Amino acid sequence: MSEYLSKNFGKGFSVTNLKQMRQFYKIYSCDQIGQTLSDQFEYLPKVDTGRKFFLSWSHYLQLMRIDNVDERHFYEIESAKNDWSLSELERQYNSSLYERLAIK
C-alpha cells in the first residue's frame, strides 16, 4: 500500500505514516467532544459532523498517546484555544496539567 500510494501521490505515505493515519482514524472517527467541553469551542467554525480539527498533525500524534478520552479532549481544546506549540503541549502534558486542575 505504501509503495502504491507513494508512487501515485508522492511523499507522505510511508508505512509508519499509514499506521499513524489508521490510528488517527480509529481514535477520532467516533470521537465527539462532549457537551461540556464543546461549549469551549463555540467561537470556532463547525462542520456538518460537529467535529473540526484545528491542530497540526504533530499535535494529534502526541494527543493519540493519551488513552483517557476526557484528558485527550482537554489537551486538544487547550492547545487550540491557547495556540500551544507542540513543545508547549508536551510541556503541559508532562507537567500533568489535566490532573492538577482536576484535583481542584
Image: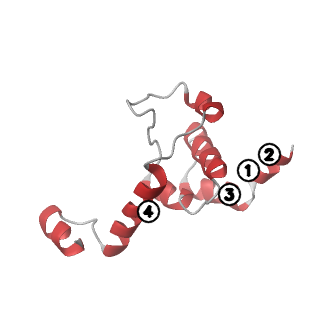
**Does residue 90 sit above or below 69 in this rendering?**
below
Say which residue label 4 marks.
23
- Disc 2 is placed on an element classified as helix
Say which residue label 2 marks.
101
Residue type for callout 3: Tyr
Alpha-carbon span between mark 1 and mark 4: 23 Å
Q: Quadrant of the N terminus?
A: bottom left
Snapshot quadrant of residue 22: bottom left
Q: Is mark 1 in CB contact (under 8 Å) with mark 2?
A: yes
**Does residue 51 sit above or below 56 in this rendering?**
above
- Disc 1 is placed on an element classified as helix
Q: Is mark 1 in CB contact (under 8 Å) with mark 3?
A: yes
Say which residue label 3 marks.
93
**Does residue 50 sit above or below 79 in this rendering?**
above
Residue type for callout 4: Gln
Residue type for callout 2: Leu
